[in-house]
Image (cartoon, helix red, strand yellow):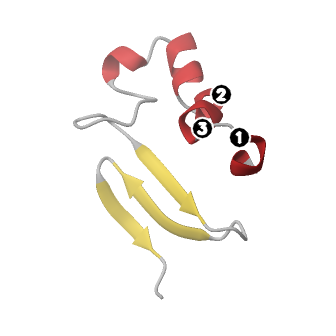
C-alpha cells in the first residue's frame, strides 16, 4: 500500500510511532523512535498480516519458524 502511493515508509509510520510519542512527551525517554539505544517494541507482519517476529526492548521474543 505504501509503495503504491509513493510514500516513504518512515513517513507512513509516523502516525503510529513518532507522532503519538511526541504528543505524550515520550520521545525524551526513547519511546516512539527506532534508534540505537532506544526503547523499541516492534511487531513485524507479512503481507497476510501474520506475525513474523516480535522484538521487545531490543530482544527478539517471538520469531515465526520458516
Real-space CA distance between mark 1 and mark 2, rounded to the nearest whole angstrom:
17 Å
Q: Nearer the viewer, residue 56 or 37?
A: 37
Check disc 2: other Cα within 10 Å, few if <14, some if 14-19, many if 20+: few
Q: How far is the residue under mark 1 from the one under mark 3?
A: 6 Å
Q: SS of the residue at dot 3? A: loop
Most foreground residue, 4 or 61:
4
Mark 1 or mark 2, earlier in chain:
1
Return the disc, 2 or 3, that comes first in the chain's sequence.
3
| Residue 42 on image: x %, y % | 46, 50
Residue 5 place in picture, x, y as percent: 77, 42
Rendered view: 27 above or below 58: above
Position of 40 compared to 11: left or right? left
Q: In the structure shown, which secondary structural element does the residue marked by tag 1 occupy?
A: loop
In space, the residues marked 2 and 3 are separated at their CA atoms by 13 Å
Q: Residue furthest bottom?
A: 66
Q: Which residue is mark 1?
A: 6
Q: Which residue is mark 3?
A: 8
Write the residue at 22% across / 36% down.
37
Q: Residues within 10 Å of mark 3 (few under 14, many from 20)?
A: few
Question: Can you identify the residue that label 2 sits on?
Answer: 15
Query: Which residue: 60% across, 30% down?
Result: 11
Q: Residues within 10 Å of mark 1 (few under 14, many from 20)?
A: few
Amino acid at each position: 500500500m505504501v509503495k503504491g502511493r509513493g510514500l516513504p515508509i518512515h513517513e507512513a509510520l509516523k502516525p503510529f510511532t513518532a507522532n503519538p510519542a511526541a504528543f505524550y512527551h515520550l520521545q525524551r525517554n526513547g519511546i516512539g523512535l527506532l534508534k540505537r539505544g532506544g526503547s523499541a517494541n516492534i511487531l513485524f507482519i507479512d503481507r497476510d498480516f501474520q506475525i513474523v517476529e516480535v522484538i521487545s526492548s531490543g530482544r527478539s521474543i517471538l520469531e515465526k519458524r520458516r
